[in-house]
Amino acid sequence: MNAAGQNVSYLALTTLASVVMIGLGFLPRPSLPTGLWSFAFSLAMISSYLSIGAATIGADVLQALGAGLFLAANAFLWLGLRVRRGTGRAHWMLAVGYLVGSPLALLATAGSPAYAWTFRIDFSVSAVFAVLIMIELIRLAAPRREEVYPLLLTAGAFVPVAVFVIVDGISQVLSGRPWADELTGVRGVNTVAVGVYVMSALITLLLLTRQAPPEAPTGASDVFARVASVRLRRAEAVDDGWWSLIEVRLDDPDALREAFGTSNLERVAAGFHEAVMASLPPDADVRDHEGTRIVALIHRPDEPLRRLLAEILERVSRPDADDHVPFLPSASIGWASVDAVGYRLDALEAAARDAVEEATEAGGDRWERARSAPRPVV
């Protein structure tokens, strides 16, 4: 295929990927991660149009601008994964700085002998972001294993390609042509690699978007914290000791996913969520964590609450005739009451978390009660 044909194929591929990510990812499930991923695919699409323009009119400046924008797209794929994982520090300045610096560096050397080495260095920086993408995907692999493989593998391949790009430049130096503007070998590798990389990124990110539960509205977690904190302060003022916070977790979701597959676990997680929500009293304040962990603040005396916990465990493990899964699920519950832990929400959450982990370590399908507030981490 000649250069013009390659450019047209590149344009068609990146345009399709951008439209699919926006149409099937961002629009039905608008969120900051899907917005960042859509922006990254849009950068690749704009790059392809600039490459067509550069080939048509022979403008080195357009070629440099397009290459710089495409390489910068990796930074926004990484940033979206980092935001998706819910990390406290998203490192926006790294992504935005690279978006500005990558095309500027290539534009500054466009048409000059220094362009080839500027491109090689820029490509290597983009490979660093590919490594960061791999790290984020590995961190996401526990809850969502199969979905990350396409992008994980191709991001890993980015590194040897970057090594080839540098070695190609060194070979030119050793042959006595240190500033030769020869990227023919590099472009040949990139022609194949770009198509595979774009489609792999699209598959992984679309699966992460479509199969994850829709994100709660911004501030939903804060709403739970505000409401629960107000209730607890009022309870403390009148010495009301009937308040408890429970954390309910589906037992061993990662092991179940690995043994029985994503689709079976998705059905079980939906059944778990339905069973827990059907058991909780209507006046409970609830916070849902991705369908396999639910936190609730409940106002009940001890004995009715014990019966409620037993009912939740029984409902979760009850076989569903309509859901043909090859295993029976179970749950663990951590129970922290204000008379044992106090009225601070963060202390109750930490105590319930420790209690549910204790129940899980004991084999699951049970509840454990926190007897006192856990010691603060120092």
Image (cartoon, grey):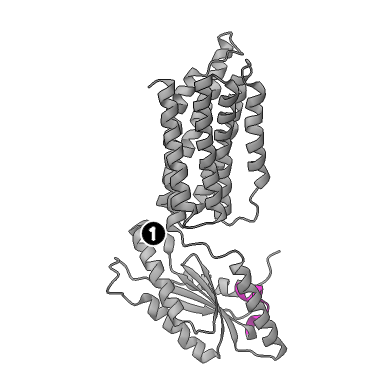
In the figure, residue 264 lies in which quadrant? bottom left
Image quadrant containing the C terminus: bottom right
Image quadrant containing the N terminus: top left
Q: Residues within 10 Å of mark 1 (few under 14, many from 20)?
A: some
Q: Is residue 191 above or below residue 201?
A: above
Left or right: where 269 falls relative to 161: left
Report which residue position mark 1 lands on: 257
x and y, in percent, of residue 77 in the image: 54, 44
For badge 1, the amino acid type reads: Arg
- Between 69 and 143, which is closer to the camera in this rendering? 69
Identity of the residue furthest to the front in this view = 57
Give the total of numbered labels: 1
Left or right: where 88 falls relative to 248: right
**Residue 343 appears anywhere in the view:** no
x and y, in percent, of residue 202 in the image: 44, 44
**Residue 322 appears anywhere in the view:** yes
| Span shown in magenta | 340-349
Q: Is residue 366 magenta?
A: no
Q: Is residue 291 above or below residue 184?
A: below
x and y, in percent, of residue 230 in the image: 67, 80
- Between 46 and 264, which is closer to the camera in this rendering? 46
